[in-house]
């Protein structure tokens, strides 16, 4: 299980996201600077213990229509070769030193562990408490077999999220703009073979639930 350090970060995660979010094609804000606030999320463990994996949910409170985003992040102690395009920035961690922060959809360690979560091989971990399972994260899998740990081939942003191609022909789609699901139940297409869902804090203080990611065949999901 990952150890959550009580540390000081400079800059903070939200400060990094303030400058990065407007560069994304799925960003819904206007010309002004976003004002992201933490709304939820969870962690996954790296089996090698080298890479920090966190799925942060943030709500941009700037403007009259707040938007909520899922931001998968990885934290590394050295740059990831070939991932310069996915670098969000660097931060100084008061315990671990300098950390390189990446858009995790382009990090093979995060993608492998997210596929393992969909398939039920790992459990989501609490975002803030060490050695604690996050019971609000749900998942399902009706596919066959296990995805190889090196199964991801490419990730591309769209207007709604990020699509990660898998070597066996399936697509892992991450919902970057989050929407509450009716009655909290995931709405899946016939092409879906698995999903990950979760909860976050709405701007009005209520608890919302919705889809985070869907694993599907090569058909549109």
Image: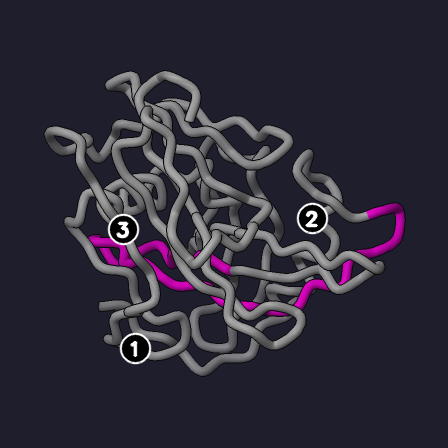
Q: Which of marks 1 and 3 precedes in the sequence?
A: 1
Residue at horizontal 59 percent and vertical 62 percent from the top: 91
Name the element at disc 2: helix
> According to the image, label 2 marks what residue?
21
> According to the image, label 1 marks what residue?
130
Residue 14 visible (yes or no): yes
Give above or below for 76 relative to 214.
below
Measuring from the top left, give residue 196's x and y in whole percent.
34, 48
Q: Locate residue 169 relative to residue 83 in the image: left or right.
A: left
Give above or below for 4 relative to 153.
below
Measuring from the top left, give residue 94's x and y in whole percent.
51, 77
Q: Residue furthest right?
A: 31
Name the element at disc 3: strand
Q: Which mark is residue 139?
A: 3
Crowdedness of circle 3 by 10 Å Cα count: few (<14), some, many (20+)? many
Q: Locate residue 206 relative to residue 64 in the image: left or right.
A: left
Q: Which of marks 2 and 1 precedes in the sequence?
A: 2
Name the element at disc 1: loop
Image label count: 3
Residue 110 within the magenta-colored segment of the rendering: no
Residue 32 within the magenta-colored segment of the rendering: yes
Give above or below for 5 relative to 121.
below
Measuring from the top left, give residue 191's x and y in whole percent.
33, 24
Choose top left, top right, bottom left or bottom right for residue 59: bottom right
**Quadrant into which the C terminus falls:** top left
Whole-Å distance between the Cαs marked 3 and 2?
A: 27 Å
């Amino acid at each position: 299980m990952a150890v959550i350090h009580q540390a000081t970060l400079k800059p903070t995660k939200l400060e990094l996201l303030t400058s990065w979010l407007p560069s994304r094609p799925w960003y819904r804000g206007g010309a002004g600077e976003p004002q992201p606030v933490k709304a939820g999320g969870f962690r996954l463990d790296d089996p090698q213990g080298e890479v920090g994996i966190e799925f942060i949910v943030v709500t941009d409170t700037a403007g009259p229509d707040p938007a909520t985003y899922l931001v998968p992040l990885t934290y590394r102690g050295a740059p990831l070769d070939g991932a310069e395009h996915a670098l969000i920035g660097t931060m100084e961690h008061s315990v671990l030193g300098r950390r390189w922060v990446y858009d995790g959809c382009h990090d093979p360690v995060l993608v492998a562990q997210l596929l393992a979560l969909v398939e039920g091989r790992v459990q989501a971990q609490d975002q803030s408490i060490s050695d604690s399972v996050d019971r609000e994260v749900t998942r399902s899998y009706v596919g066959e077999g296990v995805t190889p740990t090196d199964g991801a081939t490419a990730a591309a942003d769209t207007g709604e999220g990020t699509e990660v191609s898998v070597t066996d022909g399936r697509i892992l789609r991450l919902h970057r703009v989050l929407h509450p699901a009716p009655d909290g139940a995931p709405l899946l297409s016939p092409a879906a073979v698995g999903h990950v869902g979760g909860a976050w804090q709405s701007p009005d203080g209520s608890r919302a639930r919705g889809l985070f990611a869907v694993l599907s065949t090569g058909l549109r999901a």
